[in-house]
Image (cartoon, grey):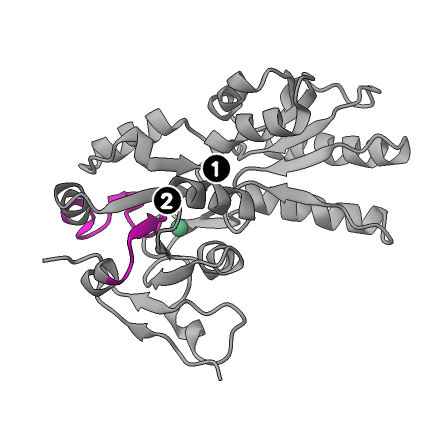
Amino acid sequence: MNMKPKITPIRELMSQYDVLLLDAYGVLVNGKGSLPYAKEFVNHLEETKKDYLIVTNNASSSTYAIAKSFEKNSLLIPQEKILSSGSLLSPWIRENFKNDSPRVLFMGSLESQGLLQEAFCHITNVKDYKENSLENYDVLVICTQEEKDFRLNFEKLMSYLFQAEERNSFPQIILPNPDLIYPKDEKNFGIVSGMIAYMLEGALRLRFPRKIFKIEALGKPGSYIFEKAKDKFPGKKLLMVGDQIETDVKGAHKAGIHSALMLGGVVCEKSLDGEGAYQPRFLLENLKVL
Ligand SMILES: [Mg+2]
């Protein structure tokens, strides 16, 4: 039977697990700044030398820039303790294309595009893609686009994918950040790249109803980011702390990692009653350690 998980203090979880994998948005920060107790919690982890790793779906900045933005919110987290889905982009391309330099069509900000620097590929930003050009690409990378021109660029991308499928040169689609939404503050939400992929999938299903298109998620709930996290702590007992069932809890579950769901983030607490395929092992109310 599926029992509703119990609210457990973070202190108890720290003694039960060797390593804490921490989501950033909805756990340590939101769009406005750091969340209550986050600063004391991070200081405590550092002072007691507790093993931890920030596992974030952020694909819009480098780990250096992420560490800097944490610092602005008084969270002193070393860059080496951040595993972001954006930082997996170059390794993924290198692992999948070995010595080739693939042609990449890119949707997203210039800052995200910079994450491909070490991937040795030819990049075309969707802004520069000419409609009806017969250009073929090996990979399409979907990152979050600024609102400006979003519709125009989305429509170009959708039409390119339709045409590519018709001429049998459909690219591999990579989605560094599969998140659909994020909390801007306590009551308001914004959309992220996962929503763009979701819309593209819907469009492809309408045009090619008998075909299934695979979109490879690098970040949570994809397994790639969890495997990289596990590689860093061989043989240790890990706990994922996140605010989303769809990404943090589901992804950890698939990777054989226990999870704790932080309340007050993306998931509405009211919806946690009853049966669910992916239940967290614990619920957390806050990060109060002392
Ligand atoms: Mg989150």
Decide which of 34, 258 is in the foreground and name it. 258
Instruction: Name, please, the residue furthest toward the right.
Output: 167
Crowd tier of the residue under label 1, counting other residues whose Cα lies within 10 Å: few below 14, some 14–19, many 20 or above: many
Relative vertical location of residue 91 with respect to residue 281 in this rendering, above or below: above
Query: At which x and y percent is residue 111?
Result: 46, 22
Q: Point out the stretch of residues depicted in magenta.
A: 16-40
Q: Residue at x 21, y 38 (%)?
A: 75
Decide which of 238, 148 is in the foreground and name it. 238
> Identity of the amino acid at label 2?
Phe
Query: At which x and y percent is residue 81?
Result: 31, 36
> Identity of the amino acid at label 1?
Ser
Instruction: Name, please, the residue furthest toward the left.
Output: 290
Q: Residue at x 63, y 17 (%)?
A: 121
Q: 246 left or right of 217?
A: left
For residue 57, which numbered disc appears in the image?
Answer: none
For residue 85, which numbered disc appears in the image?
Answer: 1
Q: 212 left or right of 116?
A: right
Question: Is residue 67 rendered magenta in the image?
Answer: no
Quadrant in which the C terminus is drawn:
bottom left
**SS label for mark 1:** loop
For residue 233, which numbered disc appears in the image?
Answer: 2
Q: 1 left or right of 68?
A: right
Relative vertical location of residue 172 with respect to residue 250 in this rendering, above or below: above
Instruction: Name, please, the residue furthest toward the front.
Output: 235
Decide which of 249, 226 is in the foreground and name it. 226
Snapshot quadrant of residue 214: top right
Q: Residue at x 49, y 19 (%)?
A: 114
